[in-house]
Amino acid sequence: MEVSLFIFNSDGMIKKLIYNILLVAGVLFILDFAIGRTLRHFYFREIAGFHYRTTYSMEKTMEDVLIFGASRANHHYVPEIFGDSLKMTFYNTGRDGNGIFYQAALLKSVLKRYTPKIIILDYKGEFWKGPLEYDQMSSLMPYYRTHKEIRPIIELRSPYEKLKLGSETYPFNSQILTIAMGNLDINKTRNADNKGYVPLEATHAPELKVYTSTASYEVDSNKVNAFKDFVTSAKASGAKVYVVYSPLYQKLARYQENEICSEICAREKIPFFDFSRDTFFLQRGNLFYDGVHLNHKGAILFSNIIAGKIKAGLNNSPD
Amino acid sequence: MVFTSFNFLIFFPLLATLYFLFPTKHRWLILLAGSYFFYINIKPVYALLLAGVTLSTYLFTRLIDNTPNESRKKTYLVLNIVLILLPLFFFKYFGVVNEGIFGLLESLNVRWPLPSIELLLPVGISFYTFMAIGYTIDVYNEEVAAEKNLGIVALFVSFFPLILSGPIERAGNMLPQFRARKGPDYDMIVGGMKLMLWGYFMKLVVADRVGIYVDAVYHNIGEHNGTSLLFAAALYPFQVYADLGGYSLIAIGTAKILGMNVMDNFRRPFFATSMAEFWRRWHISLISWLTDYVYTPLSFAFRKYRVRGIVTALLITFLISGVWHGASLTFVIWGLMQGIFVSIEALTVKPRNNFAQRFNLKKRGWYIAVGCLVTFTLFAASQVFARADNLQDAFLVYARILSTSGPLFIGVPSILLFGLFGIGMMMLKDFTDEFMPSRFLLFENKHKPVRILSYSAVILLIFLIGVFDGGEFIYFQF
Amino acid sequence: MERTDIVTKLTPIFKKVFNDDSIIITDGLTANDVANWDSLSHMLLIAEVETGFAIKFKLKDLNKMRNVGDMIDIISSKL
């Protein structure tokens, strides 16, 4: 007979192959477990820097005022100003290079523990389709195992994320040196922060760039949903919620994300402070570090404005 | 589907199992179906093009085989080559030629609104078109018989391990293997998995990591000093080697698991002591293709001009190699540089050999090291043109390397350190394979525990420092 | 012409093209055995052999030359 099912004829070979593959898998499992657990241990022992600030934001904050956002949140909201003006405790959870998924995940972990009095989301809404913000979620990976509430967000990355996160080392991919450095004493001075806030010191004013494209980008519904989810659950928690688009030192021909942001905020009756085209800031390059970041001087000024607006709002509100 | 996607890690074991379970006589059907599934997963419409190239090649090779008339044979040969080159030219060069004509007309003050079309290059087209052309010429030269089964021809052109980035295989090697009725072979399967593992290491740990640094510098040439540009220029050859070399290893390993031997694509290129030798070690499948189908006929045609004829043939061959990589002036210059390097070597081979023989240098370590270093430097210098977006950028890189200095740009220190660590491991392996092939064996160690530990350790290294997010394979654009 | 005569006539051509006086021509000799025999010097060799024997090769003949023995066969078929 022509038909020959080799796989059954070569039983011994298949057995040997499977045995050896299992052997490698076994050794890999042990190495992965040992190294992954070691990395985890040292990751959570860090006492300064990005890793530490994310851990603090997710697991330890008890402050009244919380700032959420990316680098523009982190470098724009100065703790003392909010503390003095509102007479409340303050923490800035903004982290460079992270988008709405990160912020939504952080908020979930915070609300599980307590309700802050004031939640400010600084959002230069980036709702376009693209892999960037999904990639950036790698900063949430170390928390996947211990924080069930953020899992659905991380699993947006790909259908295989669950499987990949079966590995103990994968959440700490590319982090080994950062973790090692984070456990050294010099890290405290190297990565110092002031209640999360890290000032940017600029030496000269950046160039004012003008963009002319009015083309619209394809909107990623996952990102819009994460934004909606953020504002609605923040509001439902009982906190006062504000969305802020902090100043830019560049001129865009179209602010598509503003259209989406303001629409959602209007529907949810959440104040939306839009400084994207604020002429005061656009005329003062010396307040900026670059086209999208205020320097420390600019941040102080801007924090005063926002704190003032919030204070006025609190005084006028019925409760 | 790309090799570095999770989908592939699921697709391939399933396909391989199905393949070995199927009756051997019709097993090629599984591979053909799998290959089209693999390709369609990237962009369905492009599969039509692939099928078109297959059909044309099948028809004309059969016609060549069936006619005794020599001039008819030649007509069919030329017709098929022209026909299947059309899509390649259209997708790869139309935009550039169009812009060129537009610019010319504008400079002559003629306003002729030509449609400007932004075309996305169908992936793998440069690779499978070359395979189909090679097959047609082989049939014409009676090196292989025209395959009568359309399905086997279709499989040759679309074979999924090779379609995205080679190695550019030959019908003479592949067709009999598609028909072979062998069962699964333990050594082939294990050998294939080892190649794949090292390929993944090269791609994910070395190429993608080094690429982050090189991109950061090349995206902003004007802002970086000569030190950083020189460093990025020196890193780029390692990136390309790890990228295409790693991807080729995954391809070769995949084919090997299925029981098929595919040619090597890289053989420790950075230990070549001359450019001529370098090109026998670097992207071997492309260069041997060009040697057989471009250089040999050309140099044969020019042979009465002796050395001058050969140099002309060399320059044209490398020029074509450059244009194959990309439709831009930078790649024209890149190709010409290779041609010039190799020609100069060919012209000076006698005095250089006499010199080396007189002082008995050939086996001296330092002589070999100097040869490697000079070869690497020449190649790295030419690669500036391969990496830069345009001629101005390439010249700017040279100008800034020569005129500016300062501290090295570090960026994110761990990115650079991981990248250098990866390059170190890759080169250490190449070094021992090149100079002491029977020592320091890991994957091939005679003690099983060492082997098992090495596989696990390499996988773990990929988990630990591989780049998982946003690593684009740079050879897909060719 | 006998094979031995062809070999006698080929020897100086090989010595000249490959710049090596120690070459001994055998049927089994291939490019791998001669240091300077690469795709560049190969075409010079072809051209010199054509002149030396006053013959013309075809491109297809080249593909059939796996070793010197094949080359001698092809040469003798053209004489």
Image (cartoon, rainbow, N blue to C red):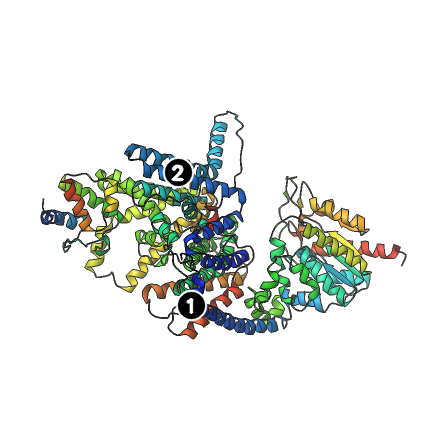
Chain of the residue under the numbered disc 1 shown in the image: A
Q: Is residue B330 visible?
A: yes
Q: Quadrant of residue A183?
A: bottom right
Q: Amino acid at mark 2?
A: Leu
Label 2 sits on residue? B59
Label 1 sits on residue? A13
Chain of the residue under the numbered disc 2 shown in the image: B
| Left-right relation of C75 to B244 | left
| Left-right relation of B94 to A51 | left
Q: Secondary structure at mark 1?
A: helix
Q: Amino acid at mark 1?
A: Met
Percent x, y for residue C54? 14, 39
The residues bearing labels 1 and 2 have C-alpha atoms spaced at a distance of 42 Å
Percent x, y for residue A289? 64, 53
| Left-right relation of C48 to A115 | left
Q: Secondary structure at mark 2?
A: helix
Asked if the residues shown at circle 1 and circle 2 are in contact, with their CB atoms under 8 angstroms apart, the answer is: no
Q: Is residue B448 above or below residue B47?
A: below
Percent x, y for residue A186? 59, 71
Q: Residue at x 51, y 70 (%)?
A: A25
